[in-house]
Amino acid sequence: MHIRDWLQQNKDREIKAENLHRFIKPGSRIYIGSGCSEPVRLTEQLAKNKNKFNDCEIVHFLTLSGNKFFDDLEPSLYRHQALFVGSSIRQAVNEGKADYIPISLSGIPQLIKSGQLRIDVALLQVSPPDKFGFCSLGINVDINRTVFENSKKIICQINPKMPRTSGDSFVRFDDIDHFVYDDTDLLEFKYPESDEVAKRIGQHCARIIENGSTLQFGIGSIPNAVLMYLTDKKDLAVYSEVISDSIMELIECGVVNCRKNRHPHILTSFAMGTRQLYDYVHENPFIEFRSTETINNILHIAQNTKQVSINAALSVSITGQVNSDSIGSEIFSGVGGQLDFAIGAALSTRGKPIICLPSVTADGNKSRIVATLDPAAGVVVPRSEVHYVITEWGVAFLHGRSIRSRVLQMIGIAHPDFRKQLLDKAKELNFVYQDQMLPLNQNGVVVVYPEEYEWSYIAPNAEKISFRPVKTTDERMLQELYYELEEEDRRFRFFSPKNTFSHKETQTAVNVDYESIFAIVGLVGDEEKQKIVSIGSYYLHCSLNVAEIAFTVAKGFRNQGLTRHMLTRLIDIAKEKRISGFMGEVLRMNDPMIHVLKTSPYVIKFEAEEDAFSFHFNFNEKR
């Protein structure tokens, strides 16, 4: 339909923006179109003419424009209700001049449909009608769809720059009561460049995302940073409330193709990005926009293949309580869809709900991993529903774990400067053993986990084994390895038929300084169900600058070259740390270990003892 035709035919419904107040009765509840599709020409009238909207109430969901609704010199005569707190209304909410409704996105449509949150007037932005008389809600179908269908009066800013999007975005032009035609640029949104912390978090997230996964990423620079590390993945799909510019590259390079998910296309609710993204989604059948009622339905989320949810938090307690909407009592954002996707992803087959955050505040003065949440802080995701928590220091997997295990996992991904403080508080709260250790250096400072020593090994039987330095949280897995050994195996390792491996003893083996003591473990399984199948370690004798070595391999993983592999890597690590050689003892009956030593490329000197051999070799003496 040509612009002149439909405009001419509907002159009786066209209004001027400055006359908006004439079409809204006093006491009305007004909904503002969300996100980057906010009808700015209409909403700026609400800000400019505050005294003309007597006793009206304005409902916001993610308002992004710079309209100044609050002015002490000219107070408004209406109240604001925020379903999600953006920057334009944050100060007012925290000063008590506006209200915040904490609610999950999945609950908002029913709130509106039931009339509990009655909408009298909807101010929306849509595309011009097509030849069949349908406008598109464009880049924001989300709540706008429900509002359009349940408002008493609909006033639209019709804008030819609004994309016509596929999916459930189309509404009848005849259902619009009044409109303003306005050809202006849509609001744009761009995440800041990712800093080093965001990049490290993104890398940790990407590591646990499997090929064939379905992605949801919440609003925030950190969830968005994950996308840059997914270019080596295959057959990803997207089922997410929001998409940003970053998604275009993943589609174009074939990483996101939706071939393995039940939906053959991307499903989303709204887009926040630049004009380039808006042009990309215009009439693009591969990207479908659906209502919040559809996208945030937990049962729909759960039906996706390997649904991964990636959302940011403001703080997380050491037991796993996630706060994402407030800083203490100060409201910062909102609940959004975080809980919907945390539960939905957990119900999805091989799904992974992920919460990510920097370990410290921007000024570096406070830990964002906390012993307990601040008073009045909101719990958006309860600890019972939390699975993965990721900071720049690593990954903690909490689901199904005890409080003690959770606390140690969380301390392990806190900033090293705050770990001892968190452990002391955990002891005070009786969350952990009173003698619980942390890895400290010789000066009593908490050491940093050396993630550069992580690698994978493919055994001759094609089993993939992940190797990494030992962590504090490995204590129970190491005990399980030792308890599964047969009597002869324990004799080979401990030179006695040892049958107890207490906490007091075992925790010293997993709390090492990675300098004078270094231990590597081989693991099978992912974070949800890991098992240690081998351990190799060295203990430095400083006066000799020679380290004593020891190895253990689980019965089902022998004859796969694990001991030789660990010895080789420990030699590499020891050389980096300027250690000159290795030494140790081996029982005469331990033929496999003796064979590994004798077939190494180093000149190894053996000395016979009663029932054992002592050995030593220098790294600069090769055969």
Image (spheres, rainbow, N blue to C red):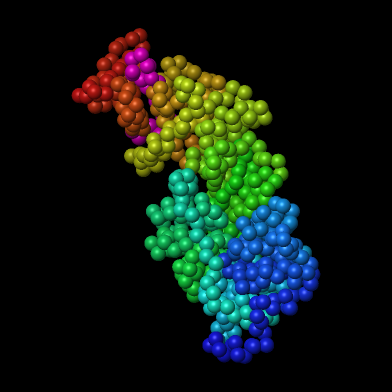
Quarter of the view holding residue 376: top right
Which x, y percent locates residue 522? 42, 34
Residue 73 visible in the snapshot? yes
Which part of the image, by quadrant, shows the N terminus?
bottom right
Which x, y percent locates residue 372? 66, 37
Q: Is residue 390 magenta?
A: no
Which x, y percent locates residue 157? 61, 76
Residue 347 visible in the snapshot? no
* Depth check, front residue: 70 or 475: 70
Q: Residue furthest left?
A: 623
Which part of the image, by quadrant, shows the C terminus?
top left
> Which residue is pictured at 58% across the width and 38% down the height?
366
> Which residue is pictured at 60% across the width and 46% down the height?
314
* Depth check, front residue: 505 or 612: 505
Query: Which span of residues is magenta-colored?
Result: 539-561
Quarter of the view holding residue 603: top left
Quarter of the view holding residue 619: top left
> Which residue is pictured at 70% across the width and 46% down the height?
329
Q: Residue furthest top?
A: 610
